[in-house]
Amino acid sequence: MYVSCKAIDDRIPREIRSLSTLGSLLKEGDLITPRGELRQELKIFMGGAFFKTPPSPDAELFPWVFSTFDLDRDEERIDPEGWELRNYLKNPVILWAHDSTIPAIGIAEDTAVSERVLGGNIRFNDKDTDPFGWGIGRRVAAGVIRAGSVGFMVNKVEIVEEDDEPTLIFREQELLEFSICNIPSNPRALNRDFPPPEILVPHAEEPAGSFWKGIIRS
């Protein structure tokens, strides 16, 4: 996971390898209010996306799940109901590995939150316009690359206890971009079809003692 904040470095994202490190940054840097709101702009670049179904090489659109509420390798969750998409829908760029210094390799269409899952359809650039972006699309079509990662700006966070361990939940966040990448934070992103949402997020009839109750908003 990489974070970018004026309190860290205004130019170069800094790698954060653990929740405790990020938690210390938020607390010691006085970046978070008692209500969980950020005092400064904080951008997060982390994996949390899955390739859904391998399309045929001739397919034009690639269905993709961008983010879910699953716990990732960084011990974090993203509340799917907290996504702010208004600005992204005006500029739905698809990047390679969060590199905004090179032109976008494609665009996203139909981006939305449905059944507590953020997803959309990806259209890669054509070969004549962008050989590199087109090449990434061919690797996706061949099943060589199957994962991606959301880049977002944090607006509100919450830290809860799960099995006596702290878990960071991003409650409100603005989607800035979605990137195709080799290895995302979420291990489910690799070499497998995406499971249906009902497997990932229990329904309201979950027992009262469920960890999910009171954490994800209905």
Image (tube, rainbow, N blue to C red):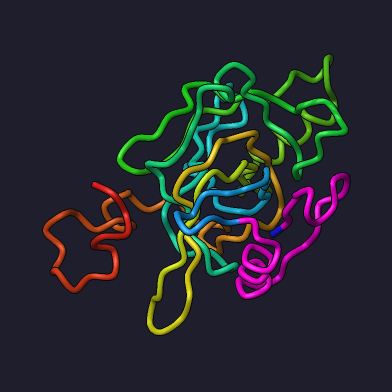
Whether residue 83 appears in magenta in the rendering, the answer is: no
- Horizontal and vertical percent position of residue 201: 30, 56
- Horizontal and vertical percent position of residue 37: 52, 49
Pick whichever, 178 or 216, lies toward us.
216
What residue is rendered at 32% in x and 59% in y? Answer: 215
Query: How many discs mark residues in the rendered view?
Result: 0
What range of the chain is rendered magenta?
A: 2-31
149 to the left or right of 218 = right
142 to the left or right of 128 = left
Quarter of the figure that contains the N terminus: bottom right
| Relative to 200, residue 139 above or below | above
137 to the left or right of 37 = right
What residue is rendered at 59% in x and 67% in y? Answer: 74
| Relative to 181, residue 100 above or below | above
Whether residue 14 appears in magenta in the rendering, the answer is: yes
What residue is rendered at 83% in x and 25% in y? Answer: 103
Question: Based on the displayed image, in which of its 4 quarters is residue 16 positioned?
Answer: bottom right
Pick whichever, 39 or 202, lies toward us.
39
133 to the left or right of 193 = right
- Horizontal and vertical percent position of residue 38: 58, 49
Question: Based on the displayed image, in which of its 4 quarters is residue 186 positioned?
Answer: bottom right
Pick whichever, 47 or 32, lies toward us.
32
- Horizontal and vertical percent position of residue 181: 70, 48
What residue is rendered at 48% in x and 41% in y? Answer: 65
Q: Return the residue found at the far bottom.
A: 164
